[in-house]
């Protein structure tokens, strides 16, 4: 059985800081599963959602367990026409870049009535529920968590309704991301780099493993 993972750089090694492991690699080793990881540093949740479904469609009818570490909702992915990092993910033609709202404030301010915060929350919830429903429809066992911080304002009834539709038995630690966990525990790879140290990956993977096993998530 394959352990498939997707996300951002928090689901990849950090060789420049001497970190040669990462959470889903640790999980695959523990469960004695082959790892297929298509996480990409700097990318956002639109890419995660689309490429996960694409990979699943390509792999039918293989059996696998999906682990999704959601990136920041501040990142806005787009498909490129310049072949950026083409070939990095085998069997996929599309290439991706990402822009951040914080780098484009003048553009944002020109858009009439744009509620930036609520748009980000809406997009995040839509990505999560879209992928959740795809997994359920195709009987794919999975677990999700926030690799980078994301949040939902449940004082807004629309968001509470959609948040309640998330299967939290398959969403680990929704209130605290992997990044927030390692910052709190001082388990970063270096003082100048907020990515996880090896121990930061190990401790998160241990808690994630306990959650997976307690809820029997590797099966449908």
Image (spheres, rainbow, N blue to C red):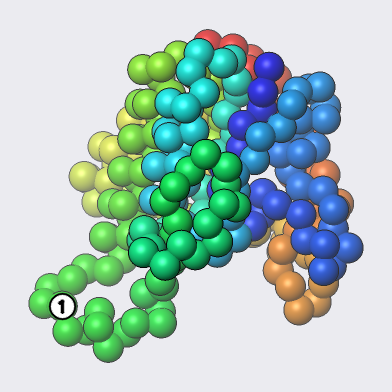
Q: Position of residue 83 (x, y in %)?
A: 46, 62
Question: Where 118 sits versus 90, above or below?
Answer: below
| Identity of the residue drawn at 61% across and 32% down | 4
In-image side of 143 versus 166 (left or right): right
> For the image shown, how many numbered marks are present on the structure?
1
In-image side of 54 versus 7 (left or right): left
Q: Residues within 10 Å of mark 1 (few under 14, many from 20)?
A: few
Quarter of the figure with residue 214 = top right
Q: Position of residue 146 (x, y in %)?
A: 55, 48
Circle 1 SS class:
loop
Question: Where 97 sits versus 58, above or below?
Answer: below
| Identity of the residue drawn at 63% across and 17% down | 218
Q: Position of residue 211 (x, y in %)?
A: 67, 28
In-image side of 85 versus 54 (left or right): right
Q: Nearer the viewer, residue 102 or 149?
A: 102
Question: Where 39 sits versus 142, above or below?
Answer: below
| Tag 1 residue | 111
């Amino acid at each position: 059985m394959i352990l498939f993972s997707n996300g951002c750089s928090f689901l990849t090694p950090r060789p420049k800081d001497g970190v040669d492991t990462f959470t889903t690699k640790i999980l695959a080793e523990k469960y004695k599963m082959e790892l297929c990881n298509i996480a990409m540093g700097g990318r956002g949740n639109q890419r995660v959602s689309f490429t996960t479904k694409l990979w699943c469609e390509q792999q039918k009818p293989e059996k696998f367990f999906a682990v999704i570490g959601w990136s920041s909702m501040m990142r806005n992915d787009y498909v490129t026409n310049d072949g950026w990092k083409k070939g990095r993910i085998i069997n996929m033609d599309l290439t991706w870049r990402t822009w951040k709202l914080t780098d484009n404030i003048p553009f944002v301010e020109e858009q009439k009535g744009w509620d930036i915060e609520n748009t980000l929350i809406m997009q995040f919830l839509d990505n999560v529920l879209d992928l959740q429903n795809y997994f359920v429809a195709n009987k794919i066992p999975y677990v999700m968590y926030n690799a980078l911080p994301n949040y939902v304002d449940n004082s807004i009834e629309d968001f509470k309704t959609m948040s309640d539709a998330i299967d939290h038995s398959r969403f680990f630690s929704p209130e605290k991301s992997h990044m927030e966990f390692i910052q709190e525990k001082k388990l970063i790879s270096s003082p100048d780099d907020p990515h996880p140290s090896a121990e930061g990956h190990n401790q998160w993977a241990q808690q994630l493993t306990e959650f997976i096993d307690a809820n029997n998530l590797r099966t449908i």
